[in-house]
Amino acid sequence: MQSSTIKASSINVLKNETKKSIILFERGMKMNNIFEDTKYLIKKYNVKANKSLGQNFLINQDVVNKIIESSNINKDDLVIEIGPGLGTLTKYLLEKAGKVLCIELDAKMITILKDRFSLYNNFEVIHEDVLECNLNKIIEKEKEKNNLHNAKIVANLPYYITTPIIMKLIEDELNLESITVMVQKEVADRLIAVPGEKETGAITYTVYYYAQSEGILDVPKESFIPEPEVISKVIKLNIRKQPIVKIENKDNMFKIIKYAFMQRRKTLLNSLTNSKIFSNKEEGLRILKELNLDENIRAEKLRLEDYVNLTKKIKCK
Ligand code: SAM
């Protein structure tokens, strides 16, 4: 799907604004935009961005506005924000949502967030590793306690664990309506590809099975401090009410997809034979023929329906 890019002119404006903001900040003048807020908080709390926690703080107002607009939040929503950091997105989420529940690993950020949002009665922060959280339990409890109908995830994710977080969010089959996140562009393009497209990877099939996805915005490096090494992208995954295909044993299907992609340069036939998914090459050739698939086809060329049909033909060990 299409996504737009922040215009070069806005980056120049941002750079000029940045210089102006530093001068204003140094003179101790009132903070009035995201960059100024961020610089102010960094100085006030003596924050040193922790690289190993993927801390790149967002300073581009246009990007924040687009994330908030595309996540389409209202007072009926529970928003879970993963990795709120200094609270840049949180501030805007709190104005829109019924409740914002943040999950943050860095104790320093917890102190800042609690200080910053102490006057909001719809704010809560949990000091935990998101990968260790029982999100299902949290979501159901919070929805019931606050009488909220929908749960949505909004986040600028820590890039070192993007894939495990996305897998956890979708594979745990949480009762979510949507996931609006900023991730590395390269990963984003793989997540939102339609199976068979150039960027297809094993994870593409998982996301496609559970969600209808859209690219929202490409985000340049200059939109963060410190700047990350790669370009980013905001994407939105709208969780499907019903999976897009019917499959009796989806675990087997995803296992086959995983093995099909393990040796990307090989043909599907060789990958699945080497990994013993096909008992031998003859069985593989026979099955591919029955499914009208070319014997030289590669894993990323199959549609999700092809993997459904393949799974039906294979007895997984
Ligand atoms: N939301 C902020 C923003 O947009 O400026 C910060 C985003 S920064 C890319 C990622 C955040 O995730 C950091 O605040 C970091 O401390 C936090 N984080 C890293 N690993 C985490 C984990 N396993 N669980 C929860 N939060 C984590």
Image (cartoon, rainbow, N blue to C red):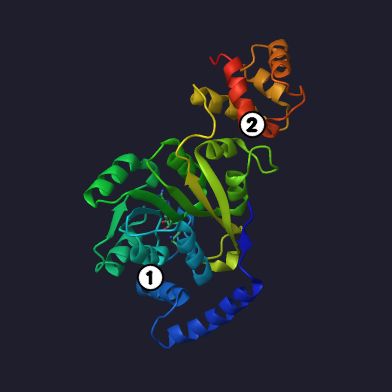
Checking the image for residue 309, the label placed there is none
Report the mark closest to the observer, 1 or 2: 2
Q: In the figure, 67 relative to 28: above or below?
A: above
Asked whether, in this view, residue 111 is left or right of residue 31, the answer is: left
Image x and y of residue 96, in percent: 36, 63
Amino acid of disc 1: Asn
Image x and y of residue 240, in percent: 48, 40
Q: Secondary structure at mark 2?
A: helix
Residue at image coords 58%, 36%:
205
Q: In the figure, 223 relative to 306: above or below?
A: below
Q: Tag 2: Cα neighbours inside 10 Å, few (<14), some, or many (≥20)?
A: many
Asked whether, in this view, residue 179 is left or right of residue 142, the answer is: right
Residue at image coords 24%, 69%:
119
Q: State which image quarter holds ligand 1.
A: bottom left
Amino acid of disc 2: Phe
Decide which of 251, 106 is in the foreground and name it.
251
> What residue is disc 1 on?
46
Residue at mark 2: C-beta within 8 A of ligand 1: no
> What residue is disc 2 on?
261
Decide which of 15, 100 is in the foreground and name it.
100
Decide which of 175, 300 is in the foreground and name it.
175
Image x and y of residue 291, in percent: 69, 20
Decide which of 308, 101 is in the foreground and name it.
308
Q: In the figure, 162 relative to 296: above or below?
A: below
Asked whether, in this view, residue 37 is left or right of residue 183, the answer is: left
Residue at image coords 77%, 25%:
296
Image x and y of residue 277, in percent: 61, 18
Q: Secondary structure at mark 1?
A: loop
Q: For residue 41, which quarter of the picture?
A: bottom left
**Residue 225 seen in this snapshot:** no
Q: CA distance from mark 1 to mark 2?
A: 45 Å
